[in-house]
Image (tube, grey):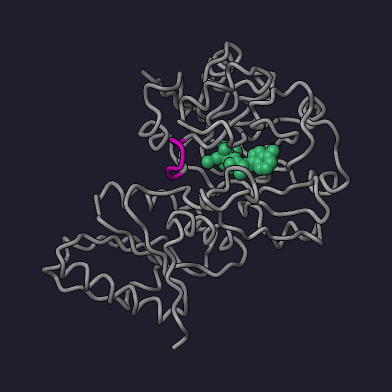
Amino acid sequence: MTRMLSVQHPDDPAIAEAAALLQAGELVAFPTETVYGLGANAFSAEAVARIFTAKGRPSTDPLIVHISDLDMLPAVIDDLTPLAEALAPLWPAPLTLVLPRGSRIPPNVSAGLPTVGVRMPAHPIALALIRAAGVPIAAPSANRFAHTSPTTAHHVYADLNGKIALILDGGETQVGVESSIVDCTTQPPRLLRPGGVTAETLRRFAPDLVIAEWYATESNVPLPAPGMLLKHYAPDAPLILFEGTDQAVREAIQRHADERVARGQTVGLLLAEEDLPHLFFPADQGRMVHVISLGSLHDLAGIARQLYAGLRAMEAAGVSVVLARSYPALGAGLAVRDRLIRAAAGNVITLPNA
Ligand code: TXA
Ligand code: MG
């Protein structure tokens, strides 16, 4: 059985308890500002191996190492590249830097790569936990492999109950999508995964940053970054993503929904608030159509915050298919669009302009 402890403050006694478990090689899920992480002592190959087992994660998918203070960095990496020096002042932040791996970090953390992803999370509970443990903490998102990432302790429980020692419940996460990952070992630097720090912000610190937009399938190797499989972050129901003008997207979603309902399917619509007045379903179809609004198109950060809970709610509703709108690739929208393309596993319908 997995225990769940609520933590409100960085000095909550639950943190010392969680830190003791980490020191003993156990797994602890904890909140960060992005999504919940599944932590293990990053210096211990045995503890790290347990992460892969608990998640059902392939050993070829590297983990991110979390630090609480810059003092910890020399124990994790081999060399701070000039680019990393330019970006590290953003920490603590939803930002992971890929750097040469230090010798104290066992190879299984990085799936055998000579590099390691490192990040200092901007969450008081996460920072307090790492400090109390006194070691860097390797932590992937605390979901079963390839499932939607958890933004609440309840999401973690649903995926990992019985497989880990403890979940620290620090409430809903604020950013809602994972950290941005920048490979600092290449010239020019590459954004391997868009995330909580926008590309616009990153470019202020690294002007030549390249966005590695590349969606890999199992047959389409080598991957742009390990672990960047196309089918990832996916809900259990199939998802179809619609891209195009607002009007074209709304009309196409209405038409697809009508056709499926006519065939007796239940349909989930993952929309923005502004879409709602444009879609219409007769009252007798109400039970066939589940509509979730992620928020306003004018608040893409708000959409990012709601995204994963929306995907999980669709699963809970038991719909046979989810029809989702896409978002502009600007600001927080870049990460939202990336996660939706992956959740759709390539099932993207690009609509012509009207
Ligand atoms: O926001 C986050 O980053 C969350 C929280 C818990 O911190 N963590 C997270 O971890 O999203 P995870 O395991 O779900 O994603 C890790 C991904 C890998 O799949 C891979 O794409 C990339 O980070 N990664 C890690 N180490 C890498 C490396 N050495 N080189 C290239 N990519 C790496
Ligand atoms: Mg993950």
Does residue 25 appear to the left or right of 287 in the view shown?
Answer: right
Q: Quadrant of the C terminus?
A: bottom left
| Magenta stretch: includes residue 332 | no
Q: Residue furthest front?
A: 219
Query: Where is 39 relative to 342, above or below?
Result: above
Q: Residue furthest top?
A: 24
In x, y percent, where is residue 254? 29, 75
- The magenta-colored residue range is 143-148
Q: Quadrant of residue 331?
A: bottom right
Q: Residue at x 56, y 53 (%)?
A: 220
Q: Residue furthest right?
A: 82
Q: Is residue 93 something that shows in the picture? A: yes
Instruction: From the viewer's side, name the closer residue of 354 and 295.
Output: 354
Q: Residue at x 18, y 67 (%)?
A: 261
Q: Quadrant of the N terminus?
A: top left
Query: Where is 337 relative to 143, above or below?
Result: below
| Magenta stretch: includes residue 145 | yes
Does residue 329 appear to the left or right of 273 in the view shown?
Answer: right
Q: Quadrant of residue 44?
A: top right
Q: Is residue 121 something that shows in the picture? A: no
Instruction: From the viewer's side, name the closer residue of 61 and 233.
Output: 61
